[in-house]
């Protein structure tokens, strides 16, 4: 089978024919939906008057909280997030009223005529203030092993530090979008740009006060999501459904870019504190870390995100004595939410920075200190939460990558360069990633599929995963065509639809192909079993001689045959039409659940991950210490994807994830003013990487011959892990700054390393030296 | 007078009117026009401000050689009358059919092969930028490829695959099915552009004028002094697309060829105010390195293809990237009114925050940049959060003339440090007459440190701006040696 099958939508993408919700033809009844949101970070609402807005020609309805027929709630896990604010607003961008109008212009005019009376209240806008006021959002969690306090006291060396890591805007190209089409009676058909159609269905049903079986959610494709549409895609869907229900006409909401940035949550910013004890070689004896996450105004997924941050506080390192504390804090900002890595990057950044700190303190190369602390193969392989690190590829990757990237040689060249240049400095860093694959909320590790085969031998696959660019459907297509032994052209993957496959988990946690691929395979296996019985009967009837056995049947090259007698075969399409005539079902559902994963939140112990994905990157940067500007010169990445399901698509995930991580680590800075207004609300001020920001020399490879046992076609998940390799760029920048005083001083550093952070750190070193 | 606009689209001349029954207003954008058609939904709005390039399309028009010239633009910022007399090409036009088989364009083919598309939302724009590259460059350098794609944000791929597609697709000489139809297109374009009567349209409170000669432009300027002047509209369009403001009076100069000349004599370079910044960049490449340097990192190609030098000066933004440099060049601005003209120094022309000394019957017509001698050095710097397609946090342009190692003249012009581009007069005075040495510069840096009180904003804190401003002086010193 080809491992390079392009994305199944590649041709429609490049010809502009791919249909996103915004492009769907809808009859001329379609109304434009607009959200009116809070201008205050925290305030009481003492009155809303929409009457003047209703007089605008073309306005069909204006809704507020009192018009919600069902429950005014859209919190996905904890019900602490109203769909429309009623008496109190808790962040700027919170929805208060909804307008359905015939044109955008009419909706805008109506919005101007709506009056909302606010009584401003004190707002908490930064993490430090939330901590000082003890404004906690979720129960404090801990994961501990050994005696961290005691070991910190007895360790030969002890370092302390703090690290601030910034928020990140998803900046999916397609802003949040939903189209609601009312049907008969209470029925509601939703086209949603949602990573979680089942939850969209549940929330639409709840706010409309109807049953789930009256709501159908379809997701054809999503124009980028990255976690930003795991829960918050539900919001626009809920608002569109309310308007469509009230107006009795289809309503589409497609958020304007600035509104999307103002209204929706981001990657959680963290303020972390660590203490690390180690010996003179740099071997870690104890690590104590407190992770403080800014959850924003409501819970959303903050608990699970904080949990994953804690479960990745170790990254790739064995920590004999360890104490990890996680706290999520409530602030008057949009509720922060899932974003590729889901807390993992924030947890890892702290220990990667701490190890960098150790190396500078001991005057060693940080890569050597990392190597020394890697989880070992036969001992020192238990994580702080008690899961054994199996099939550990860290050493293989380290050896291959340091070799292929000429790490040692380049380190020497860089040292020479830095001695010869006063104002420009180069930096180099290697960082690993070990990322746990599975939802840490263990029951979510399940998936369903519905495979329909038609009498012409063509196949339509339905599964619970959503396609958002990651190539899930292309992978599923390959799994289906390979399992049935038929040409990929005979298989189509359908739009994700709650009426075809119910009660699904979000397409998240990098799990899309692991879970749905298995469910599809299981459905196909059922059909193959039925077809097998028929095939034996048919082969025996056609060719009485040899004798055929169901156990020997092979589906290959669009045919079915007995491997003992390969010359006697039935074409797949013939067999399908025969099945119909013989009253054999050509449709089956498949189900899969990940075996053996569990985690106890209270004790912080368990085996939450089915397996780990590994990777490593070496990055080299150059900085200008006069301006703080930097340039990424080269990145070498070696990543473990098991037996790749599709090398072209996996390479795209590694490159794209890495660059997104680089953005988080460098130019993507989010700022609010003192009232809680987002200052960086458009691409004019919020800077994601452009083509000029990628490494001048970018080398991505996969670790070969590492089949992953127990997963679909021995593959590994790839969506999130490469994101965290962006930390190599961040630490290379730190390395370059620290070269200013020959690596004597730990630079003042935070994430993202904007030009401002770099320059201020550089200035500090200049003055301390002078 | 013309009451409709015409352009070539789908191999024919399309006429768009703005009568009351039309769904379009004169400031409807090309993006709005395309997306109103059932078969042209490929083009996307990603940001409505020309930063993401999801709305990229290509315009073709007759160039100076009599052949078609192709350029990429952000259709979200371009009003319909601005494409009058041009061919509009979208992603839907790139593939063609041969005996019922669809043949993809080489840029499309290659983007599929390299996996250069993931979610697909930015892809139509990326394809059009690649097409623009394909039509204008053979075996482009990495720098050229990057320049063509800087204005296309992609959040999925990390760009590497797109870069590869560009390299592989653009190895030929740009011949494709468009080449074959060029003569026909040229014929149609000539038919449209043969009529140079002013386009005038009144709809509701909007009044849109598009003259085709300078004389007519000056007449209209005098007759409608309150109308906003646009050429590329990359700044003014934001008032509509972002602030949802209805622009009422508009004079669109994009059709005035006379403002798009450039010339060079013994003493100076003369640049027409209507020249696109991309044309200025190409002109400056061998002649005015500091100008080329700043234009290289000015917006994206799509923006530079529309934005003009006159517009950058006319908007007088405190961070207008060319302004500090024009101060350092001691540039002069030529302004004309109906029957009169005058020349004014750039320093006197910019009078404050977004304020210029332009009479309400005048238009900026030319920018004159005096040539400098071998003992004069002019350099430009731009510091921004992201290197490309970003607004300056601080920009600077410096000019120095040395006489036997002593500073005989110095200009230190900054953007982003005050409400308008300004000179660091105190520091200049301090430096004048001193020797050009590192210790002088270090002393000057502490003078400069106290000269400005910049603001803190979304881009950076004031302290950072001050530090950068003085460090740039050191950078200039290092670069001068």
Image: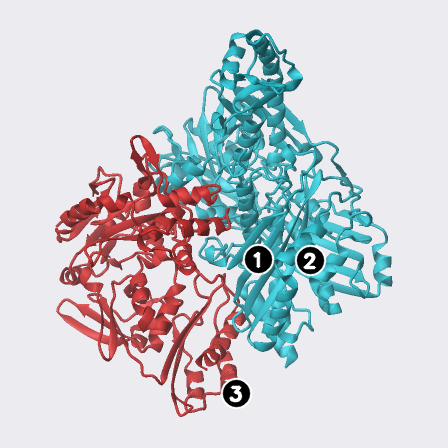
Q: Which residue is mark 2?
A: A352
Q: Which residue is mark 3?
A: B439
The quadrant of the picture occupied by the C terminus of chain A is bottom right
Question: Can the viewer see residue B232 in this picture?
Answer: yes
Which residue is painted at 49% across and 56% down in the image?
Answer: A687
Q: Earlier in the sequence, mark 1 or mark 2?
A: 2
Secondary structure beneath dot 2 equals helix
Secondary structure beneath dot 3 equals helix
Kindly indicate the quadrant of the structure image that contains residue B361. Answer: bottom left
Asked whether, in this view, residue B86 is left or right of residue A380, the answer is left
Q: Which residue is mark 1?
A: A635
Are circles 2 and 3 on residues that touch, CB within 8 Å? no
Kindly indicate the quadrant of the structure image that contains residue B34. Answer: top left
Q: Nearer the viewer, mark 1 or mark 2?
A: 1
Q: Chain of mark 3?
A: B
Which residue is painted at 45% across and 83% down in the image?
Answer: B427
Secondary structure beneath dot 1 equals strand
Q: CA distance from mark 1 to mark 2?
A: 18 Å
Out of A476 and B43, give the one closest to the viewer. Answer: A476
């Amino acid at each position: 089978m080809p491992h390079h099958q392009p994305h199944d939508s590649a041709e429609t993408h490049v010809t502009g024919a791919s249909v996103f919700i915004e492009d769907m033809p809808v009859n001329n009844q379609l109304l434009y939906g607009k959200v009116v949101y809070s201008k205050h970070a925290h305030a009481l609402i003492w009155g809303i008057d929409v009457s003047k807005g209703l007089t605008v020609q073309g306005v069909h309805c204006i809704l507020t909280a009192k018009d919600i027929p069902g429950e005014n709630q859209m919190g996905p896990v904890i019900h602490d997030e109203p769909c429309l604010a009623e008496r109190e607003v808790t962040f700027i961008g919170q929805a208060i009223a909804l307008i359905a109008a015939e044109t955008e212009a009419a909706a805008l005019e109506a919005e101007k005529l709506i009056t909302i009376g606010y009584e401003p209240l004190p707002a908490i806008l930064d993490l430090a203030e939330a901590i000082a006021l003890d404004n906690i959002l979720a129960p404090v969690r801990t994961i501990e092993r050994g005696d961290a306090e005691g070991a910190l006291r007895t360790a030969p060396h002890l370092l302390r530090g703090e690290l601030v890591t910034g928020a990140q805007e998803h900046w999916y190209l397609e802003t949040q979008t939903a189209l609601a089409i009312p049907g008969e009676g209470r029925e509601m058909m939703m086209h949603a740009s949602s990573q979680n159609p089942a939850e969209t269905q549940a929330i639409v049903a709840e706010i409309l006060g109807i049953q789930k079986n009256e709501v159908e959610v379809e997701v054809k494709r999503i124009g980028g999501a990255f976690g930003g549409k795991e829960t918050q895609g539900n919001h626009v869907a809920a608002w569109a459904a309310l308007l469509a229900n009230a107006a009795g006409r289809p309503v589409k909401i497609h958020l304007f870019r600035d509104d999307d940035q103002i209204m929706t949550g981001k990657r959680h910013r963290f303020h972390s504190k660590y203490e690390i004890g180690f010996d003179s070689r740099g071997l870690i004896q104890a690590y104590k870390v407190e992770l403080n996450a800014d959850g924003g105004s409501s819970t959303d997924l903050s608990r699970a995100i904080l949990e994953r941050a804690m479960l990745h506080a170790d990254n790739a390192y064995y920590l004999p004595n360890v104490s990890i504390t996680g706290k999520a804090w409530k602030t008057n900002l949009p509720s922060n939410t899932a974003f590729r890595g889901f807390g993992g990057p924030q947890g890892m950044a702290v220990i990667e920075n701490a190890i960098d700190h150790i190396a500078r303190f001991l005057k060693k190369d940080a890569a050597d200190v990392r190597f020394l602390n890697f989880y070992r193969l036969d001992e020192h392989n238990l994580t702080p939460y008690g899961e054994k690190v199996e099939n550990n590829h860290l050493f293989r990757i380290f050896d291959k990558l340091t070799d292929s990237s000429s790490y040692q040689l380049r380190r020497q060249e860089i040292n020479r360069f830095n001695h010869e240049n006063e104002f420009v400095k180069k930096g180099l860093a290697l960082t690993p990633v070990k990322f746990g694959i599975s939802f840490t909320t263990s029951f979510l590790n399940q998936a369903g599929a519905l495979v329909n085969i038609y009498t012409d031998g063509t196949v339509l696959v339905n599964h619970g995963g959503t396609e958002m660019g990651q190539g899930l459907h292309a992978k599923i297509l390959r799994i289906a065509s390979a399992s049935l032994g038929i040409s990929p052209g005979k298989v189509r993957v359908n739009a994700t639809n709650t009426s075809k496959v119910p009660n699904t988990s979000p397409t998240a946690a990098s799990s899309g192909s692991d879970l749905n691929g298995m469910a599809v395979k299981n459905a196909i296996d059922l059909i193959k079993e039925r077809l097998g019985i028929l095939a034996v009967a048919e082969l025996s009837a056609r060719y009485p001689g040899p004798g055929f056995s169901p156990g020997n049947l092979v589906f290959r090259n669009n045919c079915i045959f007995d491997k003992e007698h390969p010359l006697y075969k039935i074409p797949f399409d013939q067999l399908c039409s025969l099945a119909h005539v013989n009253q054999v079902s050509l449709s089956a559902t498949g189900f899969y659940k990940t075996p053996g994963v569990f985690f106890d939140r209270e004790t912080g112990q368990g085996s939450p991950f089915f397996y780990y994905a590994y990777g490593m990157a070496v990055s080299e940067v150059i900085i200008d210490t006069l301006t703080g500007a930097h340039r990424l010169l080269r990145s070498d990445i070696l990543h473990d994807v098991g037996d790749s399901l599709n090398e072209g698509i996996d390479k795209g995930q590694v490159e794209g994830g890495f660059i997104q991580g680089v953005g988080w680590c460098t130019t993507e800075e989010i700022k609010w003013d003192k009232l809680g207004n987002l200052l960086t609300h458009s691409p004019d001020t919020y800077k994601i990487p452009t083509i000029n920001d990628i490494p001048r020399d970018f080398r991505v490879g996969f670790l070969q011959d590492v089949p992953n046992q127990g997963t679909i076609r021995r593959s590994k998940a790839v969506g999130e892990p490469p994101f965290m390799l962006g930390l190599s760029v961040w630490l290379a920048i730190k390395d370059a700054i620290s070269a200013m005083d020959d690596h004597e001083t730990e630079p003042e550093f935070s994430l993202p390393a904007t030009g401002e952070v770099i320059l201020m750190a550089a200035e500090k070193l200049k003055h301390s030296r002078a | 007078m013309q009451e409709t606009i015409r352009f070539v689209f789908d191999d024919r001349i399309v006429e768009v009117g703005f009568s009351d029954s039309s769904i379009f207003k004169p400031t409807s954008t090309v993006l709005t026009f395309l997306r109103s058609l059932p078969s042209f939904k490929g083009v996307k709005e990603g940001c409505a401000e020309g930063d993401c390039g999801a709305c990229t399309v290509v315009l073709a028009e007759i160039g100076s050689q009599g052949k078609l010239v192709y350029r990429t633009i952000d259709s979200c910022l371009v009003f319909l009358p601005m494409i009058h007399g041009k061919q509009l090409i979208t992603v839907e036009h790139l593939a063609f059919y041969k005996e019922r088989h669809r043949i993809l364009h080489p840029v499309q083919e290659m983007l599929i092969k390299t996996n250069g598309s993931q979610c697909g939302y930015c892809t139509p724009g990326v394809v059009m930028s690649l097409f623009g590259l394909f039509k204008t460059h053979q075996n482009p350098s990495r720098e050229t490829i990057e320049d063509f794609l800087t204005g296309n944000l992609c959040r999925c791929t990390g760009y590497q695959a797109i870069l590869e597609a560009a390299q592989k697709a653009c190895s030929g000489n740009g011949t494709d099915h468009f080449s074959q139809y060029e003569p026909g297109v040229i014929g149609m374009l000539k038919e449209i552009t043969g009529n140079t009567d002013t386009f005038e349209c009144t709809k509701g409170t909007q009044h849109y004028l598009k003259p085709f000669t300078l004389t007519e432009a000056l007449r209209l300027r005098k007759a409608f002094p309150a109308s906003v002047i646009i050429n590329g509209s990359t700044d003014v369009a934001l008032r509509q697309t972002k602030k949802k403001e209805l622009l009422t009076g508009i004079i669109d100069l994009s059709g005035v060829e006379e403002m798009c000349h450039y010339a060079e004599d013994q003493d100076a370079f003369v640049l027409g105010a209507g020249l696109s910044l991309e044309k200025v960049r190409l002109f400056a490449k061998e002649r005015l390195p500091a100008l080329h340097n700043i234009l290289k990192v000015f917006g994206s190609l799509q923006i530079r293809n529309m934005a003009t030098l006159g517009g950058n000066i006319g908007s007088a933004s405190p961070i207008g990237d060319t302004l500090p440099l024009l101060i350092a060049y001691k540039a002069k601005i030529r302004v004309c009114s109906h029957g009169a003209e005058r020349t004014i120094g750039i320093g006197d022309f910019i009078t404050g925050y977004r304020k210029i000394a332009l009479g309400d019957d005048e238009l900026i017509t030319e920018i004159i940049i005096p040539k400098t001698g071998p003992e004069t050095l002019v350099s430009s710097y731009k510091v921004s959060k992201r290197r490309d397609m970003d607004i300056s946090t601080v920009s600077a342009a410096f000019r120095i003339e040395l006489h036997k190692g002593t500073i005989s003249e110095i200009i230190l012009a900054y953007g982003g440090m005050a409400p308008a581009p300004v000179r660091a007069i105190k520091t200049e005075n301090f430096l004048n007459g001193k020797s050009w040495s590192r210790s002088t510069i270090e002393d000057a840096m502490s003078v400069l440190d106290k000269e400005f009180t910049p603001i803190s904003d979304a881009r950076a804190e004031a302290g950072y701006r001050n530090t950068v401003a003085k460090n740039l002086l050191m950078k200039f010193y290092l670069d001068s040696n």
